[in-house]
Image (cartoon, rainbow, N blue to C red):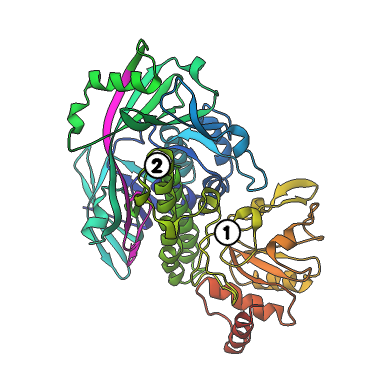
Amino acid sequence: MIRQRVPVLIVGAGYAGLSAATLLAWRGVQCMLVERRESTSRLPKAHGLNRRSMEVLRVVEGLEEALHSASSAPANDSTLIIAERVVGPAIATLVTKNALDSTLVSPAKVCTAGQDRVEPVLLRYAEEHGADINFSTTLVEFRAMSEGVEAVLRDERTGAERIVFADYLIAADGAEGAIREVAGVKMDGPGVLAHTVSILFEADLASLLPSRGLVLYYLRHPSFSGSIVTCDDPNLFQLNVEYNPAFDKASDFDLDRCAQFVRDAVGLSDLEFEIRDIWPWKMSALMADRMSFGRVLLAGDCAHVMPPVGGLGGQTAIQDAADLAWKLALVIKGHAAPTLVETYEPERRPVARIAIARQIANYVERLLPDRQELRIPADEYDMLSTSIGYRYRSSAIISEQDDSGKAVENPLEASGAPGTRLPHVWLVRGGERLSSHDLIGRHFVLFAGPEGKCWAEAAEEISKSDPPLSCYRLSSDIADPSDQFLSRLGLSSSGAALVRPDGYIAWRSREGQRQALSVLEGAFARVRGMRSMTQSHQAEAESLFETGL
């Protein structure tokens, strides 16, 4: 039997798995992805990538443009409507193109492509950067050990098996995946909220739609609730219809019955159309009681399942992968301690929890306003803060004494506090206008005020022996025409902020420090789980951390 070794083995080629493969390979980490299906998804399923997902993916050169090109609708062109049927008055209009077009929040634009278009793009970029992708390949069994994971893989086309030993295994095998179950990881939460049938059909509805972009109707029809959404293929639509399993079963939805649902949803009894596919599924809200065990890391639907009302399910999967990719890359290359990977769960699990609460709230508000008891008020925040303003707390973040403890921050009112996302501000470098987010992605970055020369010198010194640490000093390296960057980071002209590859602020010093090298060296080591500095430097730096400096 063939034996192989690889730093990272990924199981599952959905959003989480393909994003992980792309971002790991782009960072120069050898990885292998296996998927039991023959190909990427042939069904649209999820629709759209939000700004935060595009932020974490756009670091790969060309990927942002490729994703937008895969969509039939222009960036940001989305319309969300609540109605009884497509033909007829709207009960409410939730989102329009202008509502989404806000450059105050992010340099990234919303991509409206469906999952059947997004996955092939991610696959192409993963392979181009060296990821080893294997379809029609099943994980037969695995054994988690302290030093890694041993897996038996089977090629379903030939029946041949091989053994792969990986330092880490990313379980991205979906809501029904076996890895979580084998490990005894339990799923907790409200459970199944609805039984649903999706109907993919082709029809000419252009004259009925309010926009040429992505159009999504939430349907409160007198006889059913559900949704209908445009797809990237011309004249293709996906209708989702909820049903009561006490009276119906999935097999009851034959062509004739589904055809009637299509007519009712559109509101035209003489509509000409063709049904292309029908598939049942369950709308659920569940979260794993842990997102890792040993060197096995759960991502995407394997770790959390949520109602697809608001798009956060796919986004959370992509962002799980992004968090894992930069951390694993540093650890595998020896630039961070293995404990850095242990920060994955404490950072990402709270994000999944509030995403689930927001999606349930969307479901109730948009489809079932009489089911308020389903909501989870303690974890519920507005959509913008939930999707792009979530906060992190872990040993990879050096929190300050006045940390509010809040789970989110309004991205339009950025504080610059450790654990929050780097505020998006338009800057100028070498005559080129760019976002603060265009300066991050591959390495840690230090941003310093115009009087923060001591920090710039410290960063340069540290980079001689540690992993790369870029530094951008206002007035010297970058310009801030709006004069907002320092205030949004909460810094004085002599302060500095250390930003992780994922765009999250790991540490800041509001003012300059006499011992800038010791302080920055200590912060940089601490957020990577390292203790490479001398004991005296460590004690000095940690005393400053405790004062919130």
The residue that mark 1 highlights is 409
Circles 1 and 2: CB distance less than 8 Å? no
The residue that mark 2 highlights is 369
Hey, what amino acid is under mark 2? Answer: Pro
Question: Within 10 Å of the Cα at label 2, are there few (<14), some (14-19), or many (20+) other Cα atoms?
Answer: few
Q: Nearer the viewer, residue 103 or 474?
A: 103
- Which residue corresponds to the image point at 80% horizontal and 47% vertical from the top-left? 431
Q: How many marks?
A: 2
Q: Secondary structure at mark 2?
A: loop
Q: Residue furthest bottom?
A: 536
- Which residue corresponds to the image point at 49% horizontal and 27% vertical from the top-left? 90
Question: Which secondary structure dominates the residues rendered in magenta?
Answer: strand
Q: Quadrant of residue 464?
A: bottom right
Q: Magenta segment range?
A: 275-301
Hey, what amino acid is under mark 1? Answer: Glu
| In the displayed structure image, the side of residue 505 where residue 40 appears, left or right | left
Q: CA distance from mark 1 to mark 2?
A: 27 Å
- Which of the two discs, 1 and 2, labels the residue nearer the N terminus? 2
Residue 346 visible to an observer of this rendering: yes
Percent position of residue 261, x then y: 31, 23
- Tell me the quadrant of the picture where the C terminus can be found: bottom right
Percent position of residue 41, x then y: 36, 35
- Which residue corresponds to the image point at 42% horizontal and 36% vertical from the top-left? 115
Percent position of residue 12, x then y: 33, 47
Question: Within 10 Å of the Cα at label 1, are there few (<14), some (14-19), or many (20+) other Cα atoms?
Answer: many
